[in-house]
């Protein structure tokens, strides 16, 4: 396999050169050459320093491209380039070819798209490069960086900004955007980009955008959970500008399925003599041409260099350690020191552990070292795979540093301690460390349930303990908690890895710096554990009984993944794309002329200016959000009504196609052939799960098209998919908490709760309830649980506000105790600042005393629902390890795949179906005791939809 592919973003390269070299450099005839001079200097540096096996200059094609078809205002604000630069652009391609570097350009595409395609093909090894360097200053390309692994074949992708002399990897994405590379696109979609005329969401800047994506994981997940957002003004702003955000998401995305020429054409065959001749004769860069030839001759006749001095084996704490009582820490490099540490750990009976790795993705990162803390300010770092790479060796291909103990031996001696339940191990975000360790031990991806569940026993997690005590109050990341509780600022990651060429993976960090950074994390973890443990005599039940036991179960779910039917997803994508094209044509026909139906601005012109639709407020805001279009559906103008209906349908299908049919295909792991999600225990104040990459929690089920997506989730060949769903759990919890005898009796008798409610409110027999009455009662049952008022209810069931209020009053009259329960919850929130769930989780409501009426009302509604929603989360979280334990004890092959809303989804062989169908309901209901029956319904099928 060839090794190193360098992709040069040509326009970014020369624009930076032009602005960096702003003197009046010209040829003898007055032709400007400053941009070409700076460009040549950077080009020589790139080929000399990187020594690529393949090198390509990638250029934009002249506009328009596919982004202009989405929005004709794309990049419309950009001023034309300076005349001097335009003149020099004409010689750019000749200069590049003189160096023997091929040029890649494709009509209708930008350089970013071609670069993204080359990166993807390298990662999947469609083209044979294990290292890819993108030479650019374009922040958009941070979407592509990372350490990737395809069936044991690694590919490392980094950016190089030659002007800053700065390497940029995943850490740069985190530093600049606050998110992982895969989430950069989501942040950019929210914040927009005025230079490219990408709208984003007005008023949402980089900080807010990063916070939103950190919280929700993705733009899609944010909009699917937008009603959970506590900031009312921000929520409304995001809703009003959803179409603009989704358009922006498309515009900032990179097309990675372009056609490329054969990879052999990328091979770099430098022609330095030809390049020197061009520099000297055409551009009059005489000195530069001479230097180039000298470098070339030196490369042809190398002088053997002396070996670099060995890296110091002892830490230098005086350069790294703060003066507030943290450190210095101890570097472990000898067998004697390691054995001494193991004895100390055994004697202490308590140790904090942290893993150091090459990246943030637990399925791609590799273990670099381990840090341990046995007491306050007594911490150690054990390096395992640090390399001697210099600052310009970003790919860690150099030799391992000496005096590092063999990884296999360390893991073998550590394992019995990890598995000793009497030895307490404290982690901060154990799920990540557990997955890293599981990969190091070779347990995943081909693991058994017991191996992963049993790898670490006797564990604690300071992140989960913090969230259990203070969920909803603040961030629970290690650095944030250390600053908040210990008044100490941990060494930033970027400081350890440097900012120029020293910005490398942790494997290349000098051992003195690595020791202080890694051991400090372990020290902070142990200090936080001691501090948080003192907040109450015993850890809260929500931590010991729910969150802590769940960690290995969640790790196992993530590692297993779930199969999807790729043919079905591709067929859906094709079918929906066909309908989208038809809808676009029909919408344009209704408008009377072509326009981009995905552009909110162009749609606003059609709707408000040309068709004269909308209320004065809508015209002023010029919003074409869904609620505006829904209003227009009822217009007496048939053209307006038809246009609004087709636009809503177009948006629905476009969302389904991009978010599910297309996205799921791209999220299939090449290693396992499955989709692997990441579950997040910490984040939602109520304790509800969220998941990302992909967000399985929000696969749509309310429409026929959405159900088709679920239909594409399948078990492994020959097996069945089984869905175990808690039936109407929040209403049952309402009956339990409120003590309403009528509500409890309905569940005791196994009645249709919605028909029963309709009959009770209307004063008639249940058999006499119409479909319309049952539908209205369903909205009342669920709406009141979420604090819905008369106005909202009226809109849902299509009646007057007065009639809706009559429904609500009758409901509270018939279900005595419910209103009192709701008022009691609101008062508890006012008195304590929080409400509690069934298992004791505190759900904090900081806006309960807000002077802002809207915020205060929102907190009051949350006070009604949070105990129900939170208790629901508590129950299913407690059930998951219970089910895993049963499957292991009974030696069953079935395995849990997903947790979605109120259900667990499993796959099982045919001979285990009967047993699981019989036992799962009991397993999932016996974990808590309510004053009403807790019911689990089990469905079976050859896909998720039929099982659900």
Image (spheres, rainbow, N blue to C red):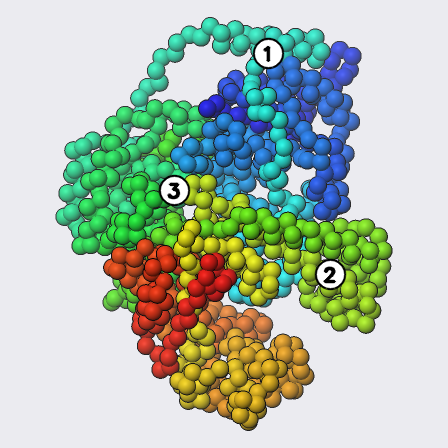
Inspect this view and state whether residue 505 appears.
Answer: no
Q: Secondary structure at mark 3?
A: loop
Residue located at (66% from left, 61% from top): 240
Residue displayed at 69% across by 17% down: 94
* Mark 1 vs mark 2: in front: 2
Q: Position of residue 281 (x, y in %)?
A: 70, 8
795 relative to 607 in the view: left or right: left
Give the spatial CA distance, label 2 vs label 3: 54 Å
Real-space Cα distance between discs 1 and 2? 58 Å
Residue 479 shows up from this direction? yes
The mark closer to the camera, 2 or 3, is 2
Q: Is residue 917 above or below residue 288?
A: below
Q: Earlier in the sequence, mark 1 or mark 3?
A: 1
- Using a 10 Å C-alpha cutoff, classify the residue at mark 3 as few (fewer than 14 neighbours), some (14 to 19) or many (20 or more): some
Residue 491 badge = 3
Q: Are marks 1 and 3 in contact (CB under 8 Å)?
A: no
**Which residue lies under the disc numbered 1?**
271
Image check: 209 left or right of 879?
right
Residue at 61 percent of width and 79 percent of height: 793
How many residues crowd mark 2 within 10 Å: few (<14), some (14–19), many (20+)?
many
Relative to 916, 760 lies left or right: right
Q: Nearer the viewer, residue 502 or 561?
A: 561
Which label lies toward us, 1 or 3?
A: 1
Which residue occupies 22% across, 44% down? 415
**Residue for badge 2:** 646
Q: Position of residue 893 (x, y in %)?
A: 32, 55
Circle 1/circle 2 CB separation < 8 Å: no
Earlier sequence position, callout 1 versus callout 2: 1
* Disc number for residue 691: none
Dot 1: what SS?
Answer: loop
The correct choice, above or below, for 779 with respect to 513 in the image is below
């Amino acid at each position: 396999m060839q090794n190193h592919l360098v992709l040069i973003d040509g326009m970014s390269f020369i624009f930076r050169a032009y602005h960096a070299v702003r003197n009046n450099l010209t040829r003898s005839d007055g032709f400007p050459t400053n941009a070409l001079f700076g460009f040549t200097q950077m080009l020589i540096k790139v080929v000399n320093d990187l020594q690529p096996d393949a090198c390509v200059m990638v250029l934009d094609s002249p506009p328009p491209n596919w982004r202009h078809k989405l929005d004709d205002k794309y990049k419309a604000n950009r001023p034309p380039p300076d005349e001097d630069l335009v003149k020099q652009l004409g010689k750019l391609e000749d200069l590049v070819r003189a160096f023997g570097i091929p040029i890649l350009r494709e009509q209708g595409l930008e350089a970013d798209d071609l670069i993204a395609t080359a990166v993807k093909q390298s990662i999947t090894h469609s083209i044979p490069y294990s290292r890819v360097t993108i030479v650019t200053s374009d922040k958009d390309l941070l979407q592509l960086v990372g350490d990737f692994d395809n069936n044991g074949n690694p590919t490392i992708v980094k950016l190089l900004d030659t002007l800053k002399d700065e390497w940029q990897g995943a850490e740069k994405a985190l530093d600049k955007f606050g998110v992982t590379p895969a989430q950069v696109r989501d942040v950019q979609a929210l914040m927009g980009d005025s230079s490219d005329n990408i709208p984003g969401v007005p008023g949402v800047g980089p900080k807010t955008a990063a916070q939103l994506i950190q919280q929700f994981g993705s733009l899609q997940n944010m909009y699917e959970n937008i009603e959970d957002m506590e900031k009312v003004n921000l929520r409304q702003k995001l809703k009003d500008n959803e179409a603009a955000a989704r358009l922006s998401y498309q515009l900032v995305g990179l097309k990675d399925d372009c056609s490329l020429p054969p990879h052999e054409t990328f091979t770099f065959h430098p022609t330095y003599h030809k390049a020197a001749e061009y520099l000297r004769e055409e551009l009059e860069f005489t000195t530069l041409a001479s230097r180039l030839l000298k470098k070339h001759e030196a490369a042809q006749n190398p002088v053997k260099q002396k070996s670099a001095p060995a890296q110091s084996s002892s830490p230098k704490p005086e350069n790294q350690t703060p003066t507030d009582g943290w450190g210095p820490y101890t570097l472990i490099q000898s067998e004697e020191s390691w054995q001494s540490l193991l004895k100390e750990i055994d004697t202490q009976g308590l140790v904090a552990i942290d893993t150091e790795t090459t990246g943030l993705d637990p399925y791609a990162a590799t273990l670099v070292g381990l840090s341990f803390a046995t007491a306050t300010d007594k911490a150690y770092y054990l390096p395992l795979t640090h390399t001697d790479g210099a600052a310009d060796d970003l790919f860690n291909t150099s030799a391992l540093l000496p005096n590092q103990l063999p990884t296999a031996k360390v893991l073998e001696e550590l394992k019995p301690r990890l598995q000793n339940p009497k030895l307490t191990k404290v982690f901060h975000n154990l799920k990540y460390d557990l997955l890293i360790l599981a990969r190091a031990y070779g347990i995943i991806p081909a693991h058994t349930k017991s191996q992963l569940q049993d790898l670490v026993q006797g564990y604690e997690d300071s992140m989960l303990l913090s969230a259990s005590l203070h969920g909803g109050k603040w961030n629970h990341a290690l650095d944030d908690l250390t600053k908040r509780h210990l008044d100490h600022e941990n060494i930033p990651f970027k400081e350890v890895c440097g900012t120029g060429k020293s910005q490398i993976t942790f494997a290349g960090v000098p051992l003195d710096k690595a020791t202080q950074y890694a051991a400090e994390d372990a020290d902070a973890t142990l200090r936080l554990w001691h501090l948080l443990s003192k907040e109450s005599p015993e850890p809260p039940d929500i931590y010991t009984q729910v969150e802590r036991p769940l960690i290995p179960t969640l790790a196992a779910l993530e590692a297993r993944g779930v199969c999807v039917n790729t043919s079905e997803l591709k067929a859906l994508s094709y079918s929906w794309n066909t309908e989208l094209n038809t809808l676009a044509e029909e919408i344009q026909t209704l408008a009377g002329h072509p326009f981009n139906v995905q552009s909110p601005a162009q749609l606003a012109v059609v709707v408000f200016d040309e068709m004269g639709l909308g209320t004065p407020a809508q015209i002023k805001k010029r919003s074409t959000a869904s609620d505006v279009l829904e209003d227009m559906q009822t217009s007496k103008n048939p053209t307006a009504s038809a246009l609004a209906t087709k636009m809503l349908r177009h948006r629905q299908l476009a969302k389904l196609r991009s978010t599910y049919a297309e996205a799921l295909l791209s999220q299939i792991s090449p290693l396992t052939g499955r989709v692997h999600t990441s579950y997040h225990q910490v984040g939602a104040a109520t304790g509800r799960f969220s998941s990302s990459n992909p967000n399985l929690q929000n696969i749509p089920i309310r429409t026929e098209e959405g159900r088709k997506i679920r239909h594409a989730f399948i078990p492994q060949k020959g097996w069945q998919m089984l869905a175990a769903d808690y039936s109407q759990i929040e209403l049952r919890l309402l009956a339990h908490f409120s003590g309403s005898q009528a509500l409890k009796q309905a569940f005791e008798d196994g009645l249709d709760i919605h028909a029963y409610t309709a009959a009770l409110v209307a004063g008639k027999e249940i058999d006499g309830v119409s479909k319309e009455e049952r539908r209205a009662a369903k909205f009342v049952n669920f709406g009141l649980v979420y604090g819905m008022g008369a106005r909202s209810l009226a809109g849902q069931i299509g009646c007057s506000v007065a009639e809706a209020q009559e429904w609500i009053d009758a409901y509270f009259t018939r279900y005595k105790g419910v209103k009192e329960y709701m008022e009691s919850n609101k008062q508890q929130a006012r008195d304590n600042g929080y409400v509690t769930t069934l298992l004791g989780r505190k759900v904090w409501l900081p806006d309960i005393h807000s002077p802002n009426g809207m915020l205060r009302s929102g907190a009051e509604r949350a006070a009604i629902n949070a105990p129900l929603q939170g208790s629901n989360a508590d129950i299913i979280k407690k059930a998951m390890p219970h089910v895993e334990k049963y499957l292991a004890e009974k030696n069953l092959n079935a395995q849990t795949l997903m947790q979605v809303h109120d259900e667990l989804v499993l796959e099982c062989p045919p001979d285990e179906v009967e047993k699981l169908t019989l036992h799962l309901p009991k397993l999932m209901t016996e974990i808590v005791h309510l004053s009403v029956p807790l019911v689990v319904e089990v469905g079976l099928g050859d896909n998720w939809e039929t099982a659900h």
